[in-house]
Amino acid sequence: MNEKTVKVIEANLLPKGDYVSPGFSTIQPDLCFPNIILGNKYDSFWLYLRRDITHNWYVDKRQQGVGFVSRDEAHILYNTALKFRGKKALEIGCWMGWSACHLALGGVKLDVIDPMLSEQLFNESVTDSLKWAGVKESVNLIPGSSPQKVEEIANKFQRKWSLIFIDGNHEAPAPLNDTIICEQLAEADALILFHDLASPDVGQGLDYLKEKGWNTMVYHTMQIMGVAWRGNVEPVIHQPDANIDWRLPPHLKDYPVSGSIQTVNKDKFGEILRAVRPYTLLSEAKLFSLYSQAKQVYSYLFWLPKMLVQAIARSKRIKYD
C-alpha cells in the first residue's frame, strides 16, 4: 500500500453514530465498498446481535441481514495490525472483506479463509474492494472451511501466524475448534482477536486460551471483541464509548475490560436486583440473563411498527417499479 492510497482514505470526520476509541489512528475505506449502507438491526434475527447499542451497524445492501464489524471494532483491527506490520496474519471469516481491508491497511501479510470465497460473485466483490483500497497484493483469499483449511494451508506453506482474527462460524463447537487449531499454529509471540463475544459459543474460544495460559481481555464494543496474547506482544488499549451503559454478559463477567468505563445512565439492573432479591432464589447471573432478554423483547416491540412501515414501503416500491 502506497502513501497516496493512505492519504485518499484517511478519516477526517466520522459519520454520525460512529465511534472510535480516542488515541487510535483512523482510516475510512468506505469508498472501496460501494454497497455499504447503514443497516436496520431488526433485519437480523441473530439472538446475540446487541440491538440496544446505539453505534452504527453497517451492512452490504445486497445482504442486509448480516453486519460488518462496527467502525470502532474495525479500528481495533486496524490499530492492532499496525503493531504487526510486515508479519503474517490470518483471518477466519471475512464476509464482504470489510475487516480484511482494515487488517491489510495496517500492513500485515494476510491469509483469509472463508467458504463463501468459493462463490464467484462473492469472491469478485471482496477482491474488487481490496484492489480499490490498494491492498490486494498483501491478501491471500482462500476458499474453504476452518479448521480444516487452516491446517491445510499451514502444512502446505509451513506457515505460522503472528496475528489471528477469528470471526467465522459462530455456532458451537466451531469457534472452539477454530481457536484450538489457531493456538497450535500461532507464533510464540502472537495475538488472537475475537469478534461477537456477545455469544457464549464464541466465548468458549477465549475461555480455552485463558485456560492454556494466554493473557486475555475484552473490549467494550457493539458486539464485544476479545483478545488473547502471549510472548513479546501487547494488545491495543481501547477506551469504550462513555455515552453507553456497558455491561458484560454472564459468560464474560470474570474478564478484565480494556480502558476505564464511565457510564452516564443509572444502574437500572442494580435497582431491579435490589427490588426482587428478597423474593427470588435465582442467582444474579440468571437474573441478569432474564433482564437482558426482557430488554431485547421490549426493543423488538418498540421497533416493530417501524419494521412494518419499512416492509410496506419496500413492497410498494417493488410493485410500482
Image (tube, rainbow, N blue to C red):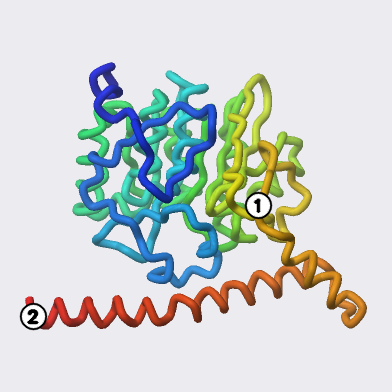
Quarter holding the N terminus is top left
Element under label 1? Answer: loop
Residue 27 or residue 189, whichever sits in front:
27
Residue at numbered disc 1: 264
Q: Position of residue 290 (x, y in %)?
A: 70, 75
214 on left or right of 62: right
Quarter holding the C terminus is bottom left
96 on left or right of 288: left
Element under label 2? Answer: helix
**Residue 149 in sight here:** no
Q: Amino acid at mark 2?
A: Tyr
Residue occupying image coordinates x 66% and y 47% = 206
**Residue 173 in sight here:** yes
Residue 271, placed above or below residue 4: below
Residue occupying image coordinates x 56% and y 34% = 185
Q: CA distance from mark 2 to mark 1?
A: 47 Å
Residue at numbered disc 2: 320
Question: In the rendered image, which quarter is residue 320 located in?
Answer: bottom left
Q: Position of residue 276 (x, y in %)?
A: 84, 77
Q: Residues within 10 Å of mark 1 (few under 14, many from 20)?
A: few
Residue 292 or residue 265, whichever sits in front:
265
Q: Nearer the viewer, mark 2 or mark 1?
A: 1
First of labels 2, 1 by sequence position: 1
Q: Position of residue 6 (x, y in %)?
A: 30, 23
Residue 60 or residue 139, whichever sits in front:
60
Q: Position of residue 252 (x, y in %)?
A: 71, 53
